[in-house]
Image: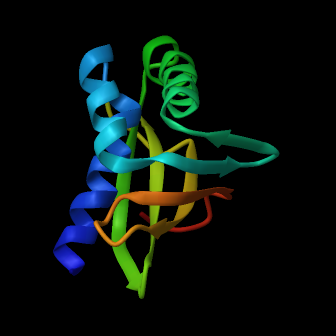
Amino acid sequence: MKSNLTELAERYAAVWNEHDPAQRRKQIAALWTEDAVHYVQEREVRGHAALEARVIEAHEKWVVQAGYLFKFVGTVAGLHDSAKFNWVMLPKDGGDAISAGLNLLLLSDEGRILVDYMYNEPLQRAW
């Protein structure tokens, strides 16, 4: 189970970096259930189309325009039908993280994301 959760966290971070629209759409469908909900700050994003728009928005702003990459860091903690992990946003050419966060995921029986809580965190941890 732990290795599956680690793979899930790696795939989750990778979808935000994906340049190919068709591949990104396929990854979204594989990660989240069709009616999944993603919460970040004051936003609620529900369903694959809205998730795709959310990922595209972040990708364009942070990966394409600003030159950063999202990366899963640390380990994944799993409990019953949930998983939590940390991520960072780093310059693609190397350097220190400029942003960090924690995701708490509630998972379906098949291991896809039902609910996705994304917390932005201060950069106080050593990654």
User: What residue do we see at 53% from left, 47% from top?
Assistant: 35
Q: Dividing the image into 4 quarters, which one contains the N terminus? A: bottom left
Seen from this angle, which residue lies furthest right? 42
Residue reaching furthest to the top: 65
The colour style of the image is rainbow
Q: Looking at the picture, does residue 65 appear above or below residue 93? A: above
Above or below for 107 versus 36 = below
Left or right: 2 as drawn, with respect to 73: left
Query: How many marks do you count on the picture?
Result: 0
Q: Quadrant of residue 61?
A: top right
Q: Residue 58, image x and y in percent?
A: 55, 27
Residue 47 occupies quadrant: top right
Residue 77 on image: x %, y %: 39, 81
**As drawn, is 95 to the left or to the right of 47?**
left
Left or right? Give the position of 84 relative to 27: right
Q: Is residue 78 visible?
A: yes
Residue name at image x 77 percent, y 48 percent? 41
| Left or right relative to 62: residue 79 | left
Regarding residue 20, the answer to whether it shows in the image is no
Q: Nearer the viewer, residue 55 or 112?
A: 112
User: Which residue is pictured at 37% across the width and 46% down the height?
Assistant: 13
- Which residue is the extreme one toward the left? 3
Figure quadrant of the C terminus? bottom left
- Camera-side residue of 17 and 31: 31
In the rendered image, which quarter is residue 69 located in?
top left
Q: Which x, y percent locates residue 87?
A: 45, 55
**Camera-side residue of 122 and 15:** 15
